Amino acid sequence: RSQLDLKIYLHSDSDKRLANYVKRSKGRRTLEDTMEKYFTEVKPKDLATLESEKHADFLAQTDMSQDKMNLLGLMISDLCGTKETGSSTGTFDV
């Protein structure tokens, strides 16, 4: 962490994480096996990762406002020395 210029934590809803995991597992294992693996392996790792949120300089959420997304884009652009090509689209030259 000490070597990072900016620490960004992207928060996503736990229900959405579960739904995405089930979708990705579809056809590869049964629903019962998928749920067991999620609750015994995946979710505990997710919870450990949530600790990173405490150290973040910027907390990004999937439902954050356009203004906050633009601010985040400007911060990243500034750190990378890039030029923004369209603030309304959130695209940047790298």
Image: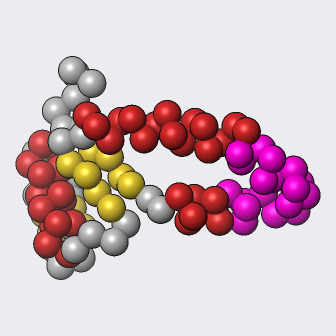
Left or right: where 60 falls relative to 80: right
Residue 1 versus residue 80 in the image, above or below: above
Vertical arrangement, residue 51 with respect to residue 89, above or below: above
Magenta region, mostly helix, strand or loop? helix
Task: Examine the rendered structure and indicate whether residue 14 appears above or below residue 58.
Answer: below
Q: Residue at x 26, y 52 (%)?
A: 59
Going by the image, does 2 lie left or right of 52? Answer: left
Q: Residue furthest top?
A: 2
Foreground pick, 85 / 12: 12
Scheme of colours in the image: secondary structure
Please tell me in which quadrant of the rendered image residue 62 appears.
Answer: bottom left
Q: Quadrant of residue 85?
A: bottom left
Tell which of 81 and 67 is nearer to you: 67
The answer to whether residue 82 is seen in the rendering is no
User: Where residue 88 sits: x, y (%)?
Assistant: 18, 79
In what quadrant of the picture does the N terminus appear?
top left
**Extent of the magenta region:** 20-39
Residue 12, image x, y percentages? 44, 59
Identified at 20% across, 48% down, the residue is: 58
Of all residues, the one furthest to the right in this rendering is 30
Q: Identify whether 27 is placed above or below 50.
A: below
Who's the residue at 16% across and 32% down the image? 5
- Residue displayed at 65% across by 42% down: 42
Q: Position of residue 83 (x, y in %)?
A: 11, 58
Q: Quarter of the image holding residue 53?
A: top left
Q: Position of residue 61 (x, y in %)?
A: 33, 61
